[in-house]
């Protein structure tokens, strides 16, 4: 979990705001055109969803609701996503029927050396981080402030917006259910567990009201209010932490350190891929940490402490709720005839790996950090 937090932190808040200018739309005319079209669709639809807020309606009409930072962040992110979409032939993979083609097991081929390469200066992580710091974070704060102003002016703002969004989305969902069903059959087979679960969901949730009823059955009103309040608080804490990380120019130090860590963790014989961390990979990583004690940047550890503290708080406050929901879902799935043995095995393996990662980061946290 903490390893994932590090990568997200780097990806979202990476690098200073004046280096490595990002232009993922350069020589990507199709991606840029699709980005503009998608952005126009959002702008056209939003007045029907949040236009009951006068200030938002005026800002949308004047073109001020999103602003230049949002346009830059959206277009560049979209272009990068489209580049990956084309590179990995996602459309072809989605369209090709693969059921019955192969019985071979899925295997992980990504290595820690690959992860180190991603963290190289001028790589995608650094560029996306520059984009996040310079444009995405200001955009989010700008939009969130306007939405918060609407909610303060009208306590029913969110309820009205949700109802309007439901009215717009429900017909689209119903219209595309057939395509989803065909895709599941194409990839998993008509008699598969995936199709059984799809049919179960269709039977249990036929409308937005069914979804609300299901949520209310398992989550009390007070708990829902607490979740919303916690999400808002966490969001503003994230903004503050991200600003501190970006303003400190910490990413170069962070990526430099973790690149060295990943290189040291990789070994063709003892740690060939990232699939299993416990054991030799963990030993390699902790050997590097102990051998380079005092070299981890303090700004990195400060950010990690803040984020992991938030995660721990969520677990402590809502752990029992999550367990209850998981139990209810598992019972329903098993009643439908679908085995949950595979899920339980994956969960157990994930918990084991997470525990090993936690031990490694406890080791990292116990070392002195370096101010720079």
Image: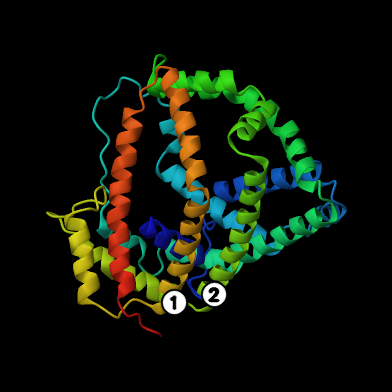
User: Residue tagged by mark 1?
Assistant: 299
Left or right position of 146 against 269: right
Q: Secondary structure at mark 2?
A: helix
Left or right position of 332 against 237: left
Of all residues, the one furthest to the bottom in this rendering is 372
Inspect this view and state whether residue 186 appears.
no
User: Residue tagged by mark 2?
Assistant: 244
Q: Residue at x 18, y 52 (%)?
A: 272
Q: Is the C terminus in the top left, top right, bottom left or bottom right quadrant?
A: bottom left
Label pair 2/1, CB-CB below 8 angstroms: yes
Q: Secondary structure at mark 1?
A: helix
Left or right position of 280 against 152: left
Residue closer to the observer: 274 or 69: 274
Label 1 packing within 10 angstroms: few (<14), some (14-19), many (20+): many
Q: Position of residue 15 (x, y in %)?
A: 48, 72
Q: Is residue 82 above or below residue 98?
A: below
Q: Residue at x 66, y 59 (%)?
A: 70
Q: Is the N terminus in the top left, top right, bottom left or bottom right quadrant?
A: bottom left
Q: Position of residue 351 (x, y in %)?
A: 32, 47
Q: Position of residue 179 (x, y in %)?
A: 54, 23
Mark earlier in primary sequence (2, 1): 2
Q: Quadrant of residue 165?
A: top right
């Amino acid at each position: 979990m903490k390893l994932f937090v590090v990568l997200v932190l780097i990806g979202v808040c990476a690098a200073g705001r004046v280096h490595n200018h990002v232009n993922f739309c350069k020589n990507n005319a199709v991606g840029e055109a699709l980005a503009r079209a998608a952005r126009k669709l959002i702008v056209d639809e939003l007045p029907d969803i949040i236009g009951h807020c006068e200030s938002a309606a005026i800002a949308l009409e004047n073109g001020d609701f999103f602003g230049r930072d949002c346009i830059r962040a959206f277009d560049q992110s979209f272009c990068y996503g489209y580049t990956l979409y084309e590179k990995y032939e996602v459309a072809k993979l989605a369209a090709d029927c693969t059921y019955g083609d192969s019985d071979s097991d899925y295997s992980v081929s990504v290595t820690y050396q690959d992860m180190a390469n991603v963290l190289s200066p001028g790589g995608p992580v650094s560029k996306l981080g520059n984009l996040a710091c310079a444009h995405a974070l200001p955009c989010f704060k700008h939009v969130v402030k306007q939405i918060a102003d609407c909610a303060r002016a009208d306590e029913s703002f969110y309820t009205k917006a949700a109802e309007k969004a439901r009215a717009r989305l429900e017909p689209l969902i119903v219209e595309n259910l057939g395509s989803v069903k065909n895709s599941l059959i194409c990839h998993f087979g008509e008699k598969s567990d995936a199709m059984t679960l799809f049919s179960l969901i269709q039977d249990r949730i036929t409308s937005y009201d069914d979804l609300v009823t299901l949520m209310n059955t398992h989550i009390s009103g007070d708990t829902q209010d607490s979740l919303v309040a916690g999400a808002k608080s966490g969001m503003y804490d994230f903004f503050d932490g991200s600003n501190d990380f970006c303003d400190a120019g910490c990413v170069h130090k962070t990526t430099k350190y973790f690149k060295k860590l990943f290189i040291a963790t990789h070994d063709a014989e003892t740690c060939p891929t990232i699939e299993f961390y416990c054991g030799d990979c963990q030993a390699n990583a902790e050997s590097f940490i102990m051998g380079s004690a005092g070299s981890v940047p303090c700004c990195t550890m400060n950010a990690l402490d803040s984020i992991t503290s938030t995660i721990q708080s969520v677990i402590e406050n809502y752990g029992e709720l999550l367990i209850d929901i998981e139990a209810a879902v598992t019972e329903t799935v098993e009643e439908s005839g679908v085995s949950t043995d595979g899920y339980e095995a994956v969960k157990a393996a994930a918990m084991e790996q997470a525990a090993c990662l936690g031990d490694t980061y406890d080791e990292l946290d116990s070392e002195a950090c370096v101010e720079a």
